[in-house]
Amino acid sequence: MQRGEREELAGLYCEKTISRKGELEIVNALKEDEWQPDNPDIEMGLISYLGLPLSWPDGEIFGTICVLGREPRKFKAEEKELFQQFKAMIEADLKLIEQQKQIRSLIRDKTKKEKELKRSKRLLEQNERLAGVGGWEYYADEDRVYWTDELFRLHGFPLSADSELKAGYIEKSLKQYPEPYREQVETAFQRAVAEGKSYELEVRFVSADGKRMWVKTAGEPVTDSSGRVVRVLGTFIDITEFKNIQLKLKERVKELDCLHTIANYLADNSLTLPEMFDHTLTMLSGYFWNPERTAIQLTYRDKVYGEADCQVSQKVISSPLEINGRVAGRLTAIYCGEPELENPAVSRQNPFLPEEEKPAGHGGK
């Protein structure tokens, strides 16, 4: 569905979710008079439901995200939290798409109306301030670059009285990207200038004042009648919030998968208690930030399960195990590694996370 299009939503559950502008949970519609009679959802055998409204960036509700079932179901708190994360991720993605559409529209206008360049720059800066997007323009023949005020702010640089800068600022900006992202960005920019190749990358960035960010940086070459690149137009967007939602969602999915696997072990009556412990400890390390260097140990009634073959080790997480209100043991995650920067506990509040995505090869800017 495109923005502005309207279509009547079939099904009373979705209609109710939209009208109340919040979460709707139905454990068993057959036992609730509100959903009787002649309910199209019930006629299809759908009697359990969890739904949330979805909104455009301006707050207008356009639909729902929902789960329906043919059996009575009481949704767990973890499932509802995960559902909220899906909703937040979808709406954050819509916001990002809206911003990109605005920027692309401005870039198209600038290339078509060269005589209105100064006015277009002012409009671009106004939109950048509203959307948190920095803009830049590189002039190939003169080897100089134009930065908007918002781009200075995002870099953590003091605002310059002269927004038209020499090429040194390109090098200064590149230093803010940690490797291997710096090489990606530099290579893509050089290809844009030399070969007319446009690019769009999601990379790590550290501002001059120490703020760590995920950014989307893009460049669009502009050529003359002979096909030679004369300018490169670019955008620089802080997408940290979107990436954090994405990472949090991965974390919750991984935790739920871990709990589900442990529950299967507990349900296996053929396993002895030591066998159950061994299976669980072997499986648990795979859910940590750096599974190759994480060992899990369990102390239960003065007996230790699990080995940690580490010359240098640090405790990452250690929690008591309680049975009927009394401590019966302790579960400990041990990180095997010496350099402090390799320890996920140094840079993460919760090491129970998927490892950060690595850039897919080199060759972008």
Image (tube, rainbow, N blue to C red):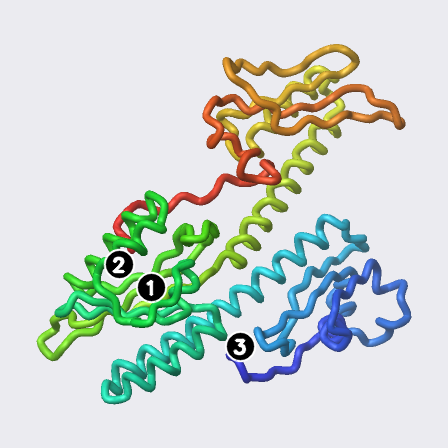
Dot 2 alpha-carbon crowd within 10 angstroms: few under 14, some 14 to 19, many 20 or more? some
Q: Where does label 2 land, which residue?
A: 170
Amino acid type of the residue tagged 3 in the rendering: Met
Q: Where does label 1 land, which residue?
A: 218
Amino acid type of the residue tagged 1 in the rendering: Ala
Amino acid type of the residue tagged 2 in the rendering: Ile
Between marks 1 and 3 in the image, the one whose residue lies nearer the viewer: 1
Between marks 1 and 2 in the image, the one whose residue lies nearer the viewer: 2
Q: Of residues 258 and 191, which is closer to you in this image?
A: 191
- Residue drawn 23% across the image and 68% down it: 138
| Rendering coords of residue 261 (x, y %) | 66, 34
Quadrant of the rendering where the C terminus is positioned: bottom left
Q: Quadrant of residue 222?
A: bottom left
Q: In the picture provided, is 142 more to the left or to the right than 38?
A: left
Query: What whole-number distance in Å separates the C-alpha atoms at marks 1 and 3?
Result: 27 Å
- In the rendered picture of this protein, how many numbered marks are placed on residues? 3
Q: Of residues 193 and 309, which is closer to you in this image?
A: 193
Q: Secondary structure at mark 1?
A: strand
Dot 3 alpha-carbon crowd within 10 angstroms: few under 14, some 14 to 19, many 20 or more? few
Q: Are dots 1 and 2 in contact, CB under 8 Å?
A: no
- Residue drawn 86% across the image and 64% down it: 30
> Residue 36, labelled with which disc?
none
Dot 1 alpha-carbon crowd within 10 angstroms: few under 14, some 14 to 19, many 20 or more? many
Q: In the picture provided, is 121 more to the left or to the right than 24?
A: left
Q: Is residue 77 above or below residue 11?
A: above
Q: Quadrant of residue 71?
A: bottom right
> Residue 1, labelled with which disc?
3
| Rendering coords of residue 145 (x, y %) | 25, 67
Q: Is residue 334 above or below residue 179?
A: above
Query: What whole-number distance in Å separates the C-alpha atoms at marks 1 and 2?
Result: 14 Å
Q: Secondary structure at mark 2?
A: helix
